[in-house]
Amino acid sequence: MNQSAKPATNTDQRKVGMWTSIAFGCTDMMGGGYGALVGAYLMFFFTTFCNLSALEAGSIIGLAKVVDSVTSIVMGRLSDTFWRTSLGRRFGRRHFFILIGSPLILIVYSLLWIPGISYAYYLVVYCLVEIVVTMVLIPYETLPSEMTTDFNSRSKMSTTRMFFSGAITSVVTLVGGLYIKAMGQHNAYAYTATGVTFAIIFALACLVTWKFTWERPVSEIEATADPNEAHQSIGQFLWTALKSYVATLKVKAFRQHMYLYLLGVTAQDLFSGAFVYFIVFGYGLSTSTASFLLSLGIIGLPLTPVNYWLFTRLGAKKCYVLYFALVIAGLAAYYIMYMMNLTRATLIPALIVVTAIYLFFKGGAYSIPWNVFPFIPDVDEMITSKRREGEFAAMMSFIRKLTSGLASVFLGWVLTANGFKTGATVQSAQATHAVVYVLIFGTGVLTLLAMVIAVTFNLDAKTHKVLVGEINRLKAGGSKADVKPDVKKVVESLTGVKYENCWPAADMTQKAAPATNNSSENDSSSK
């Protein structure tokens, strides 16, 4: 097999060291940095420098998310089955999309930040940005599950990924603030310079991940593949994909995971979208000050290992409850400061302290879903005996895009309905109160709901180890009748399915053995 494909050995025969984790994690600079730029600046850029109303700006983001949700659905299934093509076998079913995404993100993301064109232009370009980002991130998100089955290795990769995501989120707003300060508060090209700078960084990061990571060997995929899928028409492919996506929601751990993830990140969508408005119109400070405050999240980067330590020691449930509670406490602090009408001399230091603490705990809450996600396909494998990392990543992205779009439309609608004026340096009391209430109470209520649901989440290192042990026993030809009662209980608590209805191919080892040998020979002959 061509070296570009990288999946030449079994999943557990290659160790994931720190340098490999770094090479993997750096592409989430695009995931985190892109989201930070859009959340912090895009609506403000549209309403201030592009002659768009708040509702028009919100509708661009919302419509693009809806369009991209379709891309997510197609991309997950396409990535999972791309190994059947010559390009997939040469470059890898995941790595091919990461490779071609590098130049595309450089082009489309740079085009997004050109001021003063038209609604149609920004809608089309932003749709393209969302599509390209999804084309890269869905295959990218499957790599921990592709590269190793070890819980600690996957957790290390996810933590490294969150480190890069958190770092770039802070760096984005710090660099953006410096451009704004240097080029002028009312200079649209300060935002253009920021966008182009990070488009270059995102493109380079994709190349690093493509070069230094690997994926599951083709022979391993072929052993469990449905041969009928190789001859499907486009209509059959889409129908099979749709049924498969709906089936992901049958996995109890995945449903709970989605509730927590969507509530948590949608809350932060509202926070990010409203924050610059909140600082500028609520507190009467500058956009560069708002950028500086958002960049304070970088203070928490040295403490990133603490998030990893807490996740591996406490488990997802306790971490969720802790971080969500502290996020709500931070929102309460913002509201108290707003109501107190503090002087500038007191307000700035207080905002620095509260924002730094808030962003650290917000980052911790956001990192947990990505620490959990690599283990979800293992739960599904217990039910189906298949590996569907791409479909779970796509389903997660699909629903996430819809909620993110709704959050942007909701923010734009609330601001417009309360008299927000495009390009104005001062807003009415009603418009200002609308910004404050969306940021404080909108974010707070969604976070509180997520905290309540977190109490029921049971996937952690201990239960995952039990689950993988049972999968390996069944793969080795073990009988379902010999399952231990405590193992059965864990399996049912994670899958939400009766144990008797799990692992429909208990005799797969015997059936797949010849196919594995043949595919190994084919794989070797292609090297």
Image (cartoon, rainbow, N blue to C red):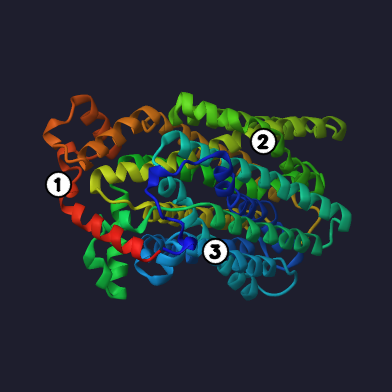
Q: Residue under circle 2?
A: 301
Q: How far is disc 3 from disc 2 in space, using C-alphas?
A: 28 Å
Q: How far is disc 2 from disc 1 in space, using C-alphas?
A: 48 Å
Name the disc covering residue 507, or none: 1
Q: Nearer the viewer, residue 117 or 341?
A: 117
Say above or below: 145 vs 185: above
Q: Residue 256 occupies which quadrant of the picture?
A: top left
- Residue 22 appears at what percent x and percent y? 59, 44
**Residue 422 can be seen in this image:** no
- Report the number of numbered marks: 3
Screen quadrant of the N terminus: bottom left
Badge 1 vs badge 3, beta-carbon distance below 8 Å = no
Give the residue displayed 49% in from the left and 29% down from the top.
Answer: 311
Name the disc covering residue 99, or none: 3
Badge 3 vs badge 2, beta-carbon distance below 8 Å = no
Say above or below: 82 vs 330: below
- Residue 336 appears at what percent x and percent y? 70, 30
Instruction: Classify 10 Å Cα crowding around label 3: few (below 14), some (14-19), many (20 and above).
Output: some
